[in-house]
Amino acid sequence: EEPQPRVSRRRLARPANREQMNEKFRACYSSHPDHAHTACGKPMPRFNDMIYTKWDADNVAYYPARVIDIEWVSGRFEYDIAFTTQDDYSPVPPDAQKHADVRPLSLTMMPDWSYDDPTPSS
């Protein structure tokens, strides 16, 4: 008898513990205070903060994204972000997988990212 083929099952990651993630962000910024604030003095994003950023460098529009993790990599922070809308700005349904990305966020903020939506209104 031949072995049954393995069936891959997609598992959802357990939601992050808010208290643990808040402590992780505090510890990261405490360890690297030169990277804890933007060039204009605003705090860099914390866990669960909403920011606006482009899908990629070729895109002119900014989309809302939630900051979900942080790591110190090669002399800078890299942030895990999850976009909360689709490319047509409609909300991502709660049961759908969100477009996520890992990227550095510039201390100068723009044109990289912002706390406010910089996309011109139509």
Image (cartoon, rainbow, N blue to C red):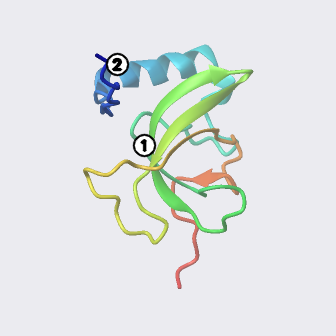
Q: Amino acid at mark 1?
A: Asp
Disc 1 or 2, which lies upstream in sequence? 2
Which residue is tagged 2?
Answer: 20
Tell me the SS state at disc 1.
loop
Residue 40 located left or right of residue 99: right
Q: Residue furthest bottom?
A: 122
Residue projecting furthest to the left: 95
For the point 61% across and 35% down, which residue is it? Answer: 37
Q: On screen, 73 above or below 38?
A: above
Residue at the spot 63% in from the left edge and 41% down from the top edge: 41
Residue position marked by numbered label 1 in the rendering:
49
Q: Which residue appears at 28% of the width and 16% of the height?
A: 1
Work out whether residue 35 or residue 88 is closer to the camera in this orientation and state it: 88
The quarter of the picture where residue 12 lies is: top left
Residue 102 % position (x, y): 58, 37
Report x, y in % for residue 49. Answer: 42, 43
Query: How would you rate the neighbour count of disc 1 (Cα within 10 Å): few for under 14, some for 14-19, many for 20 or more?
Result: few
